[in-house]
Amino acid sequence: MPKPASGKQEKGSGRKRRKGQLTIAGLAASPGLVMGKVTIVGDGVTNIPVRKLDSSQVESEIERFRHSLQETRRQFIELCDRLRDKLKKESAAIFDAHLLMIDDVTVIDRTITLVREKKIGAEQAYSMTVDSFIKVLGAVENDSYLRARTADIRDVERRVLSNLMGLGDTSRIKLSEPSVLIAHDLTPSQTAQLDRKLVLGCATDVGGSTSHTAILSRSLEIPAVVGLGNISAQVVNGDQVIVDGYLGRVIVRPNSEQIDRFFARAKAFRKIEERLAELKDLPARTVDGTLVELSANIEFPSELDSVLSHGAKGVGLFRTEFLYLTRNDLPSEQEQYEAYSQVASRIAPDQVIIRTLDLGADKFSSQIQPFPDPNPYLGNRAIRICLKRKDIFRTQLRAIFRATAHGDVKILLPLVSAVEELKKAVAFVRRVRRELTDEGVAMAGNVQIGSMIEVPSAALLIEDFLPYVDFISIGTNDLIQYVMAVDRGNERVAHLYQPLNPAVIRLIGKVVAAARENNKWVGVCGEMAGDPYTALLLVGLGVDELSTSAAAIPRIKKVIRSISFEQARRIAEKVLTLNSAAKIKNYLTQRIEELDEGIIEIFGE
Ligand code: PEP
Ligand code: MG
């Protein structure tokens, strides 16, 4: 646990120091309690991709550049609207200058000329143009107004570049000392590349608790709070903060009483974790003998140590898209094969469920899609991309099939929304298998193919889906957002993102019942599997497996081992009759209070 920092302001932060303690409430994204010095992220885009274009790519690159300018303009106008009431007149004028800068014909023409003549990527061309523009401004020694505009120009540059790089930009955050990262937002690819040794915790202005950034923080075991409003404007580099990933709040510049309380709570949580760690080698079995498979979700093979040390039984979800998101090119078949077979052989004899590429939405890759979708969660995503880009899909499937020779590997298809789509995808998977068989490649004799159930249409048509698959895994993160029409990454509507809404619970109940009736294995790999309340409910509904972040495994195991299946079944039966999320939460809280006292601490503060 880090010592309280001195709280000195770093030189050159360029912000006025704000004094005084402040407690900001947000959304708990990743459990843990940490105190440290702030590093603000997002003041500059690093790692501008350097790409050489073919002649055939030039025009679409220019179109991409124009699109990013349009997007930046839209974002500034939105920002201006949002802040209009809060800003003084002269501050609002800054944004006029920003808009003029975005539309500056000289900068646009120069960038396009560089793309055409040098055949370089738009990011590099734009950045070179802005650099030379700023040099000229700096040379006008006596014009303090023009020199002061440099910061605005850099701000515009940063936004245009991050739009060009999309949400999937691969810029790495570089830290020189252990810090708590504070940012307006962190992309999933940035989060995936955080250095665990230097990042003590994270706090962001925006985001939801089941966004992929939040999920990654949990995987990396970095305490995190999201949806904090404007925390990035309330701190300066070097400020001391406490990130409370259990309660979803951040204390900025804590006083001595708060620091004492922090140390006391951190000690208490460590004790709970130590006690839970004793369950590592015990099965996730209810008191009346029902065994629940309790497995882990991973994004990278490097998470396996944590998976094994937390006592997970296999990998229930390998989110393979992160192999694509942390680089500027596509991973080869061989690279993927090595990653998949490493996981399969280390986790054997337990199973690993490898999910095929789920890119799109907040996991944007400009390698695969030149422009972000206007409505990304409803756009070109996951299996939809794969069925259009069969070249990419084939490469991945070949790698997965080759890895089946090294362990118990199953294939899971994401975001399937229609029976025809499922049939097409399964047929393609089988075709790739036949190709490998013809080539004489070593593979397992029988490789099960499953479908994620995370779109309401798939859940409603579950009986029609089941004949085409060997198993299903319920993706509650997406299922909730699509059932409730609530963006899982938007803190402004987070109160409506309700895992316990009866519509969600009844739909899950329907899917599980259909799977059981048809003797099909059913798992849950969304975040509901890692929350003690909802895990209890899912067990009662009759799921075969719960798959969650490695760090959540001990808590969920404790819950399962504290209850009989019969009790859980009765609780689920009652919950299915309740008609509001509040009533369900209330009912679950009461039932949980009746359970063995040892598990209360898992739910409480
Ligand atoms: C889900 O949607 O619940 C899921 C497990 O997939 P992801 O979180 O990667 O979208
Ligand atoms: Mg999903």
Image (cartoon, grey):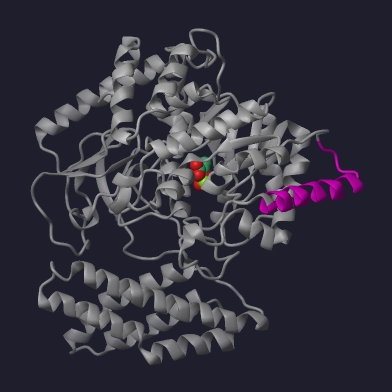
Q: In which quarter of the image is the C terminus?
A: top left
Q: Give whichever of 483, 6 is nearer the camera.
A: 483
Left or right, 71 with reference to 291: left
Specify the principal SS of the magenta part.
helix
Location of residue 537 with respect to 253 vertically, above or below: above
Left or right, 256 with reference to 228: left
Left or right, 60 with reference to 175: right
Location of residue 78 with respect to 38 vertically, above or below: below
Q: Is 432 inside the magenta-drawn segment?
A: yes
Q: Is 63 inside the magenta-drawn segment?
A: no
Q: Give whichever of 204, 34 is nearer the camera.
A: 204
Identify the image quadrant of residue 241.
Answer: top left
Q: Can residue 212 be seen in this view?
A: no
Q: Which residue is drawn at 44% across and 34% down?
A: 505
Q: In which quarter of the image is the N terminus?
A: top left
Question: Horizontal and vertical percent for residue 218?
Answer: 42, 38
Q: Is residue 345 visible?
A: yes
Which segment did they paint magenta? 420-443
